[in-house]
Image (spheres, rainbow, N blue to C red):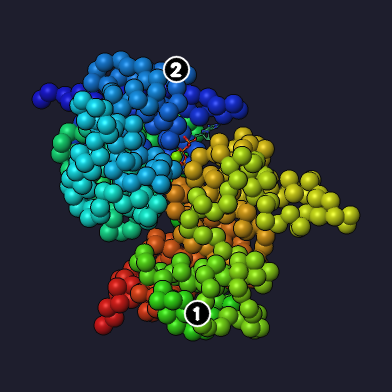
């Protein structure tokens, strides 16, 4: 039997940033017609390695071979010429251009003689590509009019349009609905059958087993090993990633439940939230399950005053409150951590510490109204440790942190204002398995302190593992409510698709 030759080999790759050894002697092999999962905790070096391959960063050391030939990748254009394209973790489309302009950005087609941009041809080609992956949308739609999932699809088409041999997908599904994810997987299978090598980064373990053939694991910038997916278990992968066995991934703690802290009655917002009523007690985690688009986030945003309710009543601590803006909500003791954390006020050119304490500066004011820097720093350091934020120091600029670690900072920011009621939307999206558990511990601790927590999540094991009670939403309405001990994946799904027997 002839051994298949790798399409891509990366050997002994090293890369440092000031104060950070992001990669040390890392190896990776990818084969045509296969999907390789690149796994590791937040900050392990996955994006950095892929940015080196796609010409965004230069490696300090190491060798890269494509098709057996050693290559020096000095820039993005060069990587593209070598057949490498990447779909970045952060979306990188230009919102005020159309879909086809984005797809052909930098590779515009011109009419032979007059060198005029050939819009017609680019539009037609884009439409064909859109069609080929079953994405029915006009190619001259402006990108700013798309939702995040659709933007992600455009990024994918952009990569396909370049006829790449190697396509890198850095957390492609974090913003996709279940249906879109299924579509993406179909596209991946098609690319595979065409002999393309795909490198796939995701923190969702289920996806690894669904779509990947092999895994390559990094930990703390070092190469740990590779394996065939068919020969490893989920637990094996977790131990390779975090370097230890992770017992009970969902630490649940029963607490004494206190008085009702939040009572929402007949809440309506346009046709998105319909007559929603529920209550949450002190010491309780209420999970809200449902499919994407079921009105969960809209409910949260209406309670938080980001959307102006059409009707309904909100009571906090037994008192009716008027919430017309997030500011009112925060004053009444509600914090809302949105699912859209990229947009959610990280100030990229500020330090980790300043980003964390942004919302609650007055907490650190001393008697003469000066910010107590020492107190602030202590608290910040405590949370960096508690959530294992991977950063060389609290003074590091937030833009230099890995995607997942930026998210942990936002979580810390809201938890630090110590609200009575915390609404947290998709708390662990894009967060690694080890850190997920740390976030659950933080939620448990808040619960113990007598806070009321609402956790919106599409992650079924998380909903089942952490909630005391589960509300299921469908089409803007509450379609079911289950106690912890009666909830199962099946009965939640039934309510979610509104098919109670
Ligand atoms: N431009 C930069 N300047 C300084 N440090 C950086 C820079 N880019 C990345 N790092 C650091 O390098 C390390 C690896 O980051 P990287 O983004 O590759 O992690 P990752 O594995 O992709 O994590 P995640 O799962 O959170 O996306 C991190 O410690 C990060 O803070
Ligand atoms: Mg990353």
Residue positioned 45% across, 22% down in the render:
58
Q: Is residue 301 above or below residue 141?
A: below
Near-viewer residue (83 or 26): 83
Residue positioned 63% across, 36% down in the render:
396
Q: Is residue 97 visible?
A: yes
Judging by the rendered image, the residue that carries numbered circle 1 is 310
Q: Is residue 258 visible?
A: no
Residue positioned 63% across, 54% down in the render:
413
Residue 33 image offset from top left, x and y in percent: 19, 35
The 10 Å Cα crowd at callout 1, few under 14, some 14 to 19, many 20 or more, is: few
Toward the front, the furthest residue is: 114
Q: Is residue 145 left or right of residue 34?
A: right
Quadrant where the C terminus is found in the figure: bottom left
Judging by the rendered image, the residue that carries numbered circle 2 is 61
Residue 66 position by quadrant: top left
Which mark is in front, 1 or 2? 1
- Callout 1: SS: loop
Q: Earlier in the sequence, mark 1 or mark 2?
A: 2
- Callout 2: SS: strand
């Amino acid at each position: 039997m002839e051994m298949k030759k790798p399409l891509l080999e990366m050997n002994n790759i090293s890369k440092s940033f000031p104060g950070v050894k992001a990669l040390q002697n890392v190896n990776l092999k990818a084969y045509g017609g296969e999907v390789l999962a690149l796994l590791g905790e937040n900050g392990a070096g996955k994006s950095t390695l892929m940015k080196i391959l796609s010409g965004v960063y230069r490696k300090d050391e190491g060798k890269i071979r494509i098709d057996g030939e050693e290559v020096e990748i000095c820039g993005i254009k060069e990587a593209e010429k070598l057949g490498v394209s990447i779909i970045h973790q952060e979306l990188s489309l230009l919102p005020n251009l159309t879909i086809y302009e984005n797809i052909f950005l930098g590779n515009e087609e011109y009419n032979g003689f007059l060198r005029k941009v050939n819009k017609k041809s680019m539009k037609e080609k884009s439409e064909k590509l859109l069609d080929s992956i079953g994405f029915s949308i006009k190619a001259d739609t402006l990108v700013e009019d798309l939702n995040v999932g659709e933007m992600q699809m455009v990024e994918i088409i952009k990569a396909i349009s370049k006829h790449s041999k190697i396509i890198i997908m850095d957390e492609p599904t974090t913003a996709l609905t279940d249906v879109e994810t299924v579509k993406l997987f179909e596209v991946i299978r098609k690319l595979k059958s065409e002999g393309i090598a795909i490198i796939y980064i995701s923190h969702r373990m289920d996806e690894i087993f669904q779509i990947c053939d092999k895994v390559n694991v990094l930990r703390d910038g070092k190469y740990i090993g590779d394996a065939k997916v068919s020969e490893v278990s989920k637990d094996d992968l977790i131990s390779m990633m975090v370097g230890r066995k992770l017992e009970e991934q969902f630490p649940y703690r029963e607490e004494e439940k206190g008085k009702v802290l939040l009572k929402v009655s007949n809440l309506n917002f346009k046709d998105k939230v319909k007559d929603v009523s529920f209550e949450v007690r002190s010491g309780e985690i209420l999970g809200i399950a449902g499919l994407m688009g079921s009105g969960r986030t809209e409910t949260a945003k209406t309670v938080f005053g980001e959307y102006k309710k059409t009707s309904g009543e909100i009571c906090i601590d037994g008192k009716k409150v008027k919430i017309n803006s997030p500011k009112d909500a925060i004053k009444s003791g509600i914090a809302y951590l949105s699912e859209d954390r990229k947009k959610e006020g990280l100030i990229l050119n500020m330090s980790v510490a300043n980003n964390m304490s942004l919302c609650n500066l007055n907490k650190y004011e001393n008697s003469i109204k000066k910010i107590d820097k020492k107190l602030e720093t202590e608290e910040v350091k405590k949370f960096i440790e508690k959530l294992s934020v991977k950063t060389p120091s609290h003074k590091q600029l937030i833009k230099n942190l890995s995607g997942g670690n930026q998210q942990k900072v936002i979580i810390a920011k809201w938890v630090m204002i110590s609200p009575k009621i915390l609404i947290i939307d998709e708390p662990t999206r894009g967060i690694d398995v080890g850190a997920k558990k740390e976030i659950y511990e933080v939620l448990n601790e808040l619960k113990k302190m007598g806070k009321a927590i609402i956790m919106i999540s599409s992650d079924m094991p998380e909903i089942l593992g952490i909630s005391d009670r589960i509300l299921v939403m469908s089409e803007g309405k509450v379609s079911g409510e289950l106690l912890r001990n009666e909830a199962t994946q099946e009965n939640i799904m039934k309510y979610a698709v509104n098919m109670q027997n």
